[in-house]
Image: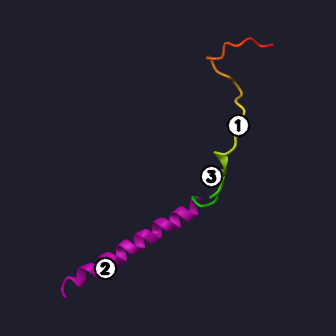
Amino acid sequence: MNILVFLVPAALLLGLLGLAAFLWSLKSGQYDDLEGAAERILFDEDPEDDGPGDDRPVS
């Protein structure tokens, strides 16, 4: 029963740390755009430069 004197405050402290981390992530904007990265991978972007490996003549 004496172990509860240590376990209850430790559990409360860990719970408060988790809550603080979650609130910090909300404040810093971690959850602002949930679907943007998932949709961004589906669209091809036109490359501005073909790179050094492109030796085809331009017609």
52 or 27: nearer the viewer: 52
Question: Looking at the image, is 16 positioned above or below residue 2?
Answer: above
Question: Looking at the image, is 29 positioned above or below residue 16?
Answer: above
Asked where in the image residue 52 lies, by quadrant, the reply is top right
Of the two numbered discs 1 and 2 on the same chain, state the one appearing first in sequence: 2
Disc number placed over residue 38 in the picture, else none: 3
Crowdedness near tag 3: few (<14), some (14–19) or many (≥20) residues, C-alpha within 10 Å = few
- State the extent of the magenta-drawn residues as a range: 1-29
Residue most extreme to the right:
59
41 or 36: nearer the viewer: 41
Asked where in the image residue 4 lies, by quadrant, the reply is bottom left
Separation of residues labelled 3 and 1 (CA atoms):
15 Å
Give the image's coloring scheme: rainbow
Task: Write down the residue under mark 2.
Answer: 9
Residue 49 shown left or right of residue 2 in the figure: right
Question: Looking at the image, is 50 positioned above or below residue 37?
Answer: above
